Image: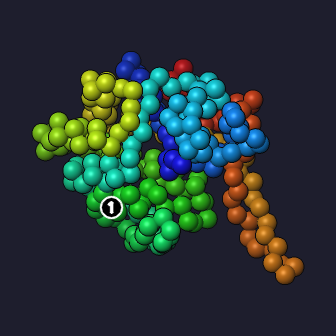
Amino acid sequence: RTDSMMVVSFDPEKKQIAIVGLPRDTRVTIPGRRGHDKINAAYAYGGTKRACARWNSSSRFPSTHYMVVDWQGFIKVIDMLGGVDLYVDNNMDYEDPYANLKIHLKKGYQHLDGEKAGQYVRFRHDELGDIGRVERQQKFMKALAGQFFTFTNMLKLPMIINTGLDYVDTDMNLMTMIRAANCFRIFGENSIKSEMLDGDSRPSMISVTGLRRRPRFRTPSINWGFPIKGLQKFKEVHP
């Protein structure tokens, strides 16, 4: 299942880039499946085509291209770029031996290499759950865009792309990917507008020996038939 899903749009005329994060727990229906599933299951049940089809049939902004990035490819590319400088808002500590996942980051401004960057964008074990993770992923994307186009990285760009292609599944050709990456350099970090798909994140109460614990976020339930705030903001950037 996909760890992260984003919709990215480039507007050359306005020189703006819009990124909409899709919480992985967003509730949707998947053709051929009974009842509801989380949107991140679409890739597991039907690969890239089904994941894209699920988004295209549910939104007013169908995608024209797709890119699937392997986890190890993400780590390698970040390392080749020299890492990313980022302020970590809170301590992050979580381990999952079944997923071979260890996350240990301290609060504060620090330099994240590929491994630590991976920990940062995957962490979701706080009070905001997946909602907080999407926000951190968008923060990371902005920081990456702002630090990517150094003179040193431009010299390494052909090598970075060749390495990335080993870990990427996409329908874009090489020139399209270069033009997309170049938009981040030309438009600048301030041109990036990020939003998150809004839904109904309902609190669930857990009863333990007659006592109720504090509410925690449950799977967002999206009613696709009504306007969605995050998509409306996305439309304002890209009508």
| Left or right position of 165 against 44 | left
| Left or right position of 150 against 1 | left
Quadrant in the picture for the C terminus? top right
Residue 13 coordinates in the image, percent (x, y) = 39, 18
Amino acid marked by disc 1:
Glu
Measuring 13% from the left and 44% from the top, which residue is drawn there? 152
How many numbered marks does the figure carry? 1
Residue 120 coordinates in the image, percent (x, y) = 42, 60
| Left or right position of 35 against 48 | right
Neighbours of disc 1 within 10 Å: few (<14), some (14-19), many (20+):
some
Residue 116's place in the image compared with 84, above or below, is below
- Residue farthest to the bottom? 209
| Residue tagged 1 | 115
Q: How is the image coloured?
A: rainbow
Measuring 50% from the left and 35% from the top, which residue is drawn there? 48
Q: Nearer the viewer, residue 182 or 1?
A: 1
Question: Which quarter of the picture shows residue 226?
Answer: top right
- Residue farthest to the top? 13
Residue 221's place in the image compared with 66, above or below, is below
Question: In the rendered image, is residue 192 in sight?
Answer: no
Measuring 75% from the left and 54% from the top, which residue is drawn there? 202
Question: In the rendered image, is residue 116 in sight?
Answer: yes
Residue 151 coordinates in the image, percent (x, y) = 14, 41
Q: Circle 1 sits in a helix, a strand or a loop, which is it?
A: helix
Question: Which quarter of the picture shows residue 44?
Answer: top right
Residue 163 coordinates in the image, percent (x, y) = 23, 43
Question: Which quarter of the picture shows residue 156?
Answer: top left
